[in-house]
Image (cartoon, rainbow, N blue to C red):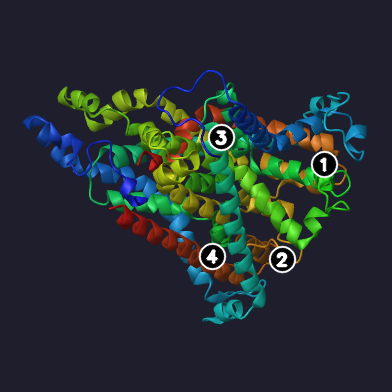
Amino acid sequence: MASVNVSPEPAPKRRSPSRLLMSVGYYIVLAALVIITVFPIYWMVTTAIRPATENLTYPPSLWPKSLDLEPVRRLFQDGNIGRWIINSTLLSTLVTAICVLMAIFGAYVLSMMRWRGRAVFAVFLLMTQMLPEALIIVPIYKIYTDIGLRESLYGLSLIDAAFVLPICVWVLKNMFDTVPREVREAALVDGAGPMRVLFQIVLPITLPGLVAVGVVAFFYAWNEFLFAQTMITTESSKPASVGLASMITMLDTPIERLLAAGFLFAIPPVLFYIAMQRYIIAGITAGAVKG
Amino acid sequence: MSLLNRVGTADHPGKSAPFSKTATGAQKRRFALPSLLPYALALPILAYEAYFILYPILQQIRLSFYQQPMGAAEEWAGLANYSRMLTDPSFWSVVRVSLMYLVGVVVVAIGFALASALMLNRHFRGRTVTRAVMTMPWAFPDVPTVLVFLWMLNPNFGVLNVFALWLPWVESAPNWLMDTRLAFVSIVLITAWKGFPFYSLVILAALQTVPAELSEAARVDGASKVQVFFAVTLPGIMPTLLLLTVLASIFSFKQFTIIWLLTGGGPAGATETIVIRIYNTAFRFYDFSYAAVLGVAGFVMALTVALVFLAAQRRQDLEAA
């Protein structure tokens, strides 16, 4: 990969053959990378929208030859899918409410207040964020059995929120850190109390961060499988992640239907995560990149 | 650079409380009392996390010293659960699989992420769209990921068989999830597929903070592109790569859904990480006290990983200083 042009002047317009070759190679590698990344999602959609006869042949055609949207259209008509989506929406909304409410104060004390124990608080949040859920599934299951929270979406929302709250705090803290000091000081000089500063000055200008927190919390619960699977066995209160997974072992589920349901389930998180990725990623890495 | 140093406030690090800094006399009095305010605001979170996370951890440790035969009361067991675990050969197999899985996912995911970040760091037409598209696996939920990969790996109709048979040395369609080695490789690659876009975006952000003048100057001095990468770019993003290694280790250590739904830990324990073993012990064999002891072992493993990387970070800080 010896370089041809080391002069400080801008490269000449006309490209030499070896540079052209490099550039073609670059696009080939890039295309391969994109294909590897996207192919499973493409395959999911392809399988979902074409007739079963095309899916159940080997070797399969790499693109649909004809369309059959019947499985997609019938998703909500029979089975429990509608019920599952409603359950998931309720669960995710509860988790979002808990997390947004608490994260506002957590981010505020981490970002804008100096107090003894702040570092300990930060480490505590980092530690809980890193703890694998499955490590404490047994004691949580026992506690939930004792206090009667199993089989309840409300009970499930409490434990989901406990695990996603630390990330929510970081995402919002990162956003709060961008508020100029002068803005807050001006309000303080005008006689506003700390809570008024928070709700009337800080929050309105960090609204995207608050939306990002909502997205993180909502889709954590939406995607969460371990606690949901363990705590909820009643068919009518299953959230969609557990319901979908249970379709795998139901032998009569046609593959088109299964993948159509899975894709439908995946659309909302994909859209929202990509829209809010800037804030979410900065929060998860806790500002590490800025260093 | 350590994780903890990052916890700065919005204000200049090391300066005193923003609420007392510029306050007039009257406000000073007003804010002298609210020094309790941060504690009051942090308390709900602390109490919440203490009840749902700290308390279960303590319960877990307590439980690991007890045994509970089905339907009977708990009885003190001393270190019996521990000695059972340490002398169980299948436990050490679980430890080995966990570590191999962790290393596999970290190497593949971060390697792939670095490659794609370097590719995406150039200017080309359609860059924004490509970036958004390359982010999708990260946002794709676990259960649908499993659904589509189960279908792609299907022994009869799976599309990956088609691709595998393109390879000259493959003669018959592989039975992906029934073969111990292929099953392990499959779950590593699937986890890496889902994880790498996140690392790629973080590396991309870090690449953009490496000053362009530095690499330009090196190029003017006659360094080749490869030399520039190793002398300028790589040191510039090294702290980020290290942090991502920590994050990727933790994320792969946490991974439950993908492994459990794809293989359930099989075949013959080839994909059974400690997290899967805990779940199977508790909810397939209903052996809660043994699952509790495995959970304690999981803490020890997670802490070890965290400490190794903290030490690595400290060393890097010292070298940089």
Q: Earlier in the sequence, mark 4 or mark 1?
A: 1
- Between the residue at mark 2 and the residue at mark 3, the CA separation in whole angstroms equals 38 Å
- Between the residue at mark 4 and the residue at mark 2, the CA separation in whole angstroms equals 17 Å
Comparing B229 with A153, the one in front is B229
Q: Earlier in the sequence, mark 1 or mark 2?
A: 1
> To which chain does the residue with label 1 belong?
B
User: Which disc is residue B297 wearing?
Assistant: none
Of labels 2 and 3, the one closer to you: 3
User: Which disc is residue B159 wearing?
Assistant: 1
Q: Which residue is mark 4?
A: B298
Of labels 4 and 2, the one closer to you: 2
> To which chain does the residue with label 2 belong?
B
What secondary structure is marked by label 3? helix
Image point (59%, 71%), residue name: B289
User: Residue A205, can we see it?
Assistant: yes
Q: Earlier in the sequence, mark 2 or mark 3?
A: 3
Q: Which residue is mark 2?
A: B269
Quarter assignment of residue B303: bottom left
Could you say where residue A147 lies in the image, as x and y percent from the top left? 54, 56
Of labels 1 and 3, the one closer to you: 3
User: Which disc is residue B119 wearing?
Assistant: 3
